[in-house]
Amino acid sequence: MELNKRQQQIVEIVKSNGPITGERIADRLDLTRATLRPDLAILTMSGILEARPRVGYYYSGKPKNKLITDELKQYIVKDYASLPVVVKDEMSIYDAICTIFLENVSTLFVINKNGDFFGVCSRKDLLRASMIGEDIHTMPVNIIMTRMPNLHYIFEDEKVVHAAKLMIDKEVDSLPIVTTKDNGKLEVKGRISKTTINKIFVSLSNE
């Protein structure tokens, strides 16, 4: 498994300063602890780092744990999908704000009148829109949403570990799980989040 730039930075910090807590690692990288959780989980599960309660992370110097890596590669996205929160592109920003908080998600997936995956609307997008002085009761979400080609998504038959890498690389909290329709457009079938992936890693560490 090839490490990304952030994971390499974490390894070097732990090598030089371990044992070190996740909070101190986050401070050195000027990131939040929550942002680092997937990276730390991957590094721990791979055997590169080890963690001790109330002590922190330290560099193990061990080769990557092939057994856990092989097991991770067997996990398929569709088996860990949760229900997506999908809204129509003409929904008002006000209604989208209500929806995202009532559903307790970080992202809404937007479809057009044909049911095609059309865009993504995040909490940040909605907050930004509510602060610019426009009428959020009439402005539709398709004005502020992220569109193709800047959308990130994953297909049902892809690996969970690929979803984890994509979320880390693109710095998003969740991904829509899609299939290709007969017309070549994408349909949202589910979602996978950092929380779900963290639960998988934790379950592996307890086996």
Image: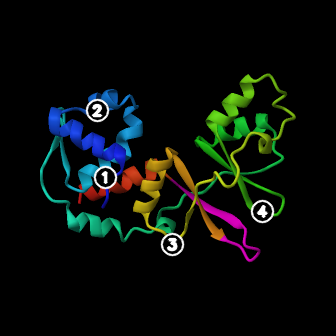
Residue drawn where x is 72% and y is 72% of the image = 184
- Residue 58, compared with residue 24, is above or below; it is below
| Amino acid at circle 4 | Gly
- Residue 42, labelled with which disc? 1
Question: Of label 3 and label 1, which has the lower sequence position?
Answer: 1
- Residue 201, percent from left and from top: 33, 54
Mark 3 vs mark 1, CA separation in Å: 21 Å
Comparing marks 2 and 4, which lies closer to the viewer? 2
Q: Which residue is mark 4?
A: 115
Q: Is residue 181 magenta?
A: yes
Q: Nearer the viewer, mark 1 or mark 4?
A: 1
Q: Name, please, the residue furthest toward the right.
A: 138
Q: Which mark is residue 157?
A: 3
State which region is magenta: 180-192
Task: Find the distance from the CA under tag 1 to the CA under tag 4.
Answer: 35 Å
15 displayed left or right of 188: left
Q: Amino acid at mark 1?
A: Ile
